[in-house]
Image (spheres, rainbow, N blue to C red):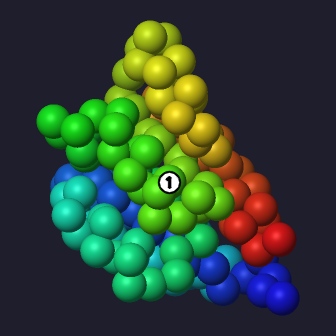
């Protein structure tokens, strides 16, 4: 059985700001970091590798929107998905939560919230 240390975190975003902010913490925790900047890369990575937690920017899927979450769930039903958004949009959050995600993170809440969510998702992923 896998312990909490040593999971693989996939960050799907454009620009790389999130992965830069989390890089030190991820390394310190003994996790591996993978990054993709488009939906095709995200789906290909999920098909070819064991990913423990996915952190995805809400804008990444572009035209697909919320349907992308269903497709991801189809590839890995148990994958904890954390969605990040720049602004708090209650209607968007409600629709995304209905997709069965692990956590919805508004970036202005700060990195501590996100780090806690990733830690909890890693624990769930290892069970």
Compared across the picture, whether 71 is left or right of 65 comes to right
Q: Residue at x 70, y 51 (%)?
A: 116
Task: Please state the horizontal and vertical placement of residue 33, each as a whole percent of the image.
Answer: 45, 77
Observer-nearest residue: 73 or 17?
Answer: 73
Residue, disc 1: 73
- 94 up-or-down from 9: above or below: above
Q: Secondary structure at mark 1?
A: helix
Task: Please state the horizontal and vertical placement of residue 19, each as a whole percent of the image.
Answer: 38, 63
Q: Residue at x 29, y 74 (%)?
A: 44
Query: Splitting the image into 4 quarters, where does residue 20 fall?
Result: bottom left
Question: In the rendered view of the protein, which quadrant contains the C terminus?
Answer: bottom right
Query: Splitting the image into 4 quarters, where does residue 26 fall?
Result: bottom right
Query: Looking at this rendering, what residue extends furthest in the front direction?
Result: 74
- 88 up-or-down from 102: above or below: above
- 98 up-or-down from 43: above or below: above
The local crowd at label 1, few if under 14, some if 14 to 19, many if 20 or more residues have their Cα within 10 Å, is: some
Observer-nearest residue: 107 or 13?
Answer: 13
Compared across the picture, whether 120 is left or right of 57 comes to right
Query: Looking at this rendering, what residue extends furthest in the top direction?
Result: 91
Compared across the picture, whether 37 is left or right of 1 comes to left
How many marks on residues?
1
Query: Splitting the image into 4 quarters, where does residue 77 fall?
Result: bottom right
Observer-nearest residue: 118 or 40?
Answer: 40
């Amino acid at each position: 059985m896998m312990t909490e240390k040593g999971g693989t975190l996939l960050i799907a975003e454009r620009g790389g700001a999130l992965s830069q902010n989390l890089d030190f913490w991820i390394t310190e925790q003994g996790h591996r970091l993978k990054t993709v900047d488009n939906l095709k890369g995200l789906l290909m990575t999920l098909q070819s590798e064991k990913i423990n937690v996915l952190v995805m920017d809400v804008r990444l899927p572009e035209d697909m929107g919320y349907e992308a979450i269903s497709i991801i769930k189809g590839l890995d039903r148990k994958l904890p998905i954390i969605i990040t958004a720049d602004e708090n949009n209650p209607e968007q959050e409600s629709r995304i939560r209905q997709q069965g995600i692990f956590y919805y993170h508004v970036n202005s809440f700060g990195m501590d919230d996100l780090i806690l969510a990733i830690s909890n998702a890693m624990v769930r992923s290892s069970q």
